Amino acid sequence: MFICVCNAVTERQVQAAVAAGASSLSDLEAQLGVGGCCGCCRETAAEYLPGGRYAGCVTETQSAGAFENDAANDDSLQPLKVVAVSRA
């Protein structure tokens, strides 16, 4: 799910930033750009911070690959190679 549409920031990215030590909206804005444009996402993003409604959804440490599926806008992902299949 996208938290910040303006900057294409996903819920997983916010969770990873909080797990890595982000503890305020200022931290999330500095790391991810959350709330830097229109500000509509600030309230939702704050719910992932310590003391927020979704704070329990963030684990203390999450290593690479800890999420079930990778986010589509993750810059570390390699593009898929398209292979042509002939129907003979």
Image (cartoon, rainbow, N blue to C red):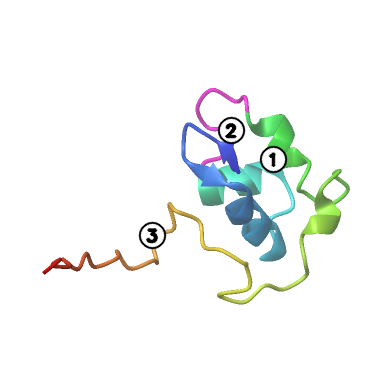
Q: Quarter of the image containing the N terminus?
A: top right
Q: Amino acid at mark 2?
A: Gly
Look at label 3 and name its amino acid: Asp
Query: Label 1 amino acid?
Result: Ala
**Quarter of the image containing the C terminus?**
bottom left
Relative vertical location of residue 24 with respect to residue 68 in this rendering, above or below: above
**Cα–Cα span, label 1 and label 3:** 21 Å
Disc with the residue nearer the chain's start (2 vs 1): 2
Secondary-structure class at tag 2: loop
Q: Report x, y in % for residue 54.
A: 81, 48
Q: Secondary structure at mark 3?
A: loop
Q: Which residues lie in the magenta part? A: 33-40
Give the left or right position of residue 23, taking residue 72 as reference.
right
Q: Which residue is mark 2?
A: 35
Picture layout, residue 63 above or below residue 78: below
Label 2–label 1 contact, CB within 8 A: yes
Residue 34 lies in quadrant: top right
Res 45 label = 1
Q: Which residue is mark 3?
A: 75
Circle 3 packing at 10 Å, graded few (<14), some (14-19), many (20+), is few
